[in-house]
Amino acid sequence: MGKKTGDSVGDLYTSLFKDNTLIITLQKNMLMLNKFPAWLSAFTLLLLTQEPVSTSEVTACGVAVDPPANIEIIDPGFLGYLSIHWTRPASLQNLTGCTVRYQLRYYDTYEERWRSVRTVKLTYAAQFDLEKAVKVRILTVLKCACTNGTEVQGEETEWVYTHEPTGVAGSRVRDFHCVYYGKEYMECTWESGPVQPPNSQHYLYYWHREMDETKECPEYIVFPEGRRGCRFPRESLLEFSKFNLCVNGSSPAGSLRMAYFSIEVQNHVKPAVVSSVHVSETDGGLKLDWSPPSGQVPEHCLEYEVESSTAMENGEEKQERMVFQNLVDTSYGLLRGVESQTTCFRIRSKVNMYCADGGIWSDWSQRKCTDKETQYIPAWKYLSLVGLVVIGIGILCLVLWILQKICIKKINKKDALYTLYKEKVNKTMPTILSPIFK
């Protein structure tokens, strides 16, 4: 089913505060016109509360330290990256010789904690989850000569905004996750919601801070039941920055519920499988060597986990796992017990904490086991073997010496008998036959 287009996308609500009166005005986001289907409308911000933390007024140098005025929360269509704008309070407009700053706090629903920033500017941009309430708190901080160089904080005011979910109930996608394979390409996949209207079609849009506008998935992963993922080439990704995604869809029964996600791609790297694993014998043990996995992950960004399984003579198996976060070279030495028979190794890798806040372990390498040529022989067995060889050589030399003596005696006896025989013949035989025995 083809996509529908529209020209009224990206509407947003701007909350203007003037003379303590809340005015909600509807504005157009001209940047996002014609970029999303008509069913992908911007979320509606509804004011739930507007309650200051305290109702008492704070004054300094004879003037009231009021909260900022004309507060605006603007959605430029960047999938949750909102801009907050305000102006200097009217009570401080003509104040001179003072420093006016603003303390802004907002609730990060992805990490479930409040974030705070102080600034002299009149604008700030932050990431929000558009499926949850947008909570903002702001106050004015005044520092003047008449305050003896100390800061005076005005009253903090809080606003909470939420949106009305639209689309077929239960149609929001599930099990959304992204894997950045070897820093060469990234795949984000999902499962359809529990309610999947017939002939539904999913769409994915993404944005990061180096993009002027959102874009649609460059290559969908399609299964017989429909689109179930998106493949991003390396060139379309940006590390160490918010990477915002939105999955929605259309169907004859109506639009599907939108799902928003914000990730940092460097925390989703899965290296390739470790290859070229070799086991060699060393004095007193074994040495394991391997080559770093292929791909674009720098070698210094990898940590390795080595698993060894050793079969013992008593029939038991001993398993050990070691994690190495900062290896100078890709090798591992292992001491072996005298009862060990066969040891098998396998290795996997992950981006270490020096290059990312998280990562995904690679698949395990193929098992590499010791064989007869690499079986370990304890030192005492070596000495016993050498002793047996020396004794054997000694016995062999003795036997050869005895045989040599026996042979020499036999030869001497034979020569003596032959000489005696010649003498007897020469005495008894005629002289004419003597030349025969010479």
Image: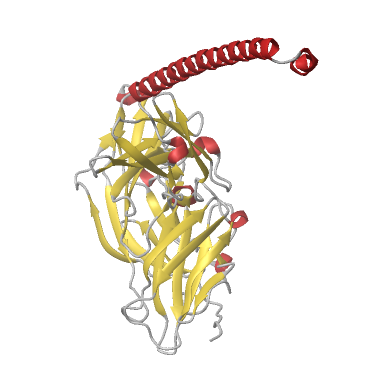
Would residue 159 be visible to someone looking at this image?
Answer: yes
Numbered marks: total: 0
From the top left corner, tell me how far across and down residue 28 is, in percent: 51, 69
Identity of the residue drawn at 27% across and 39% down: 313
Would residue 61 be visible to someone looking at this image?
Answer: no
**Above/below status of 384 relative to 257:** above
- Viewer-side residue, 84 vs 389: 389
Identity of the residue drawn at 48% across and 51% down: 265
From the top left corner, tell me how far across and down residue 332 is, in percent: 43, 32
From the top left corner, tell me how far across and down residue 135 is, in percent: 31, 55
- Viewer-side residue, 375 vs 188: 375
- Viewer-side residue, 157 vs 319: 319
Identity of the residue drawn at 53% across and 55% down: 208
What's the image's color scheme?
secondary structure
Quadrant placement of the C terminus: top right
From the top left corner, tell me how far across and down residue 138 is, in percent: 33, 46
- Viewer-side residue, 376 vs 171: 376
Quarter of the image for residue 5 reads: bottom right
Quarter of the image for residue 72 reads: bottom left
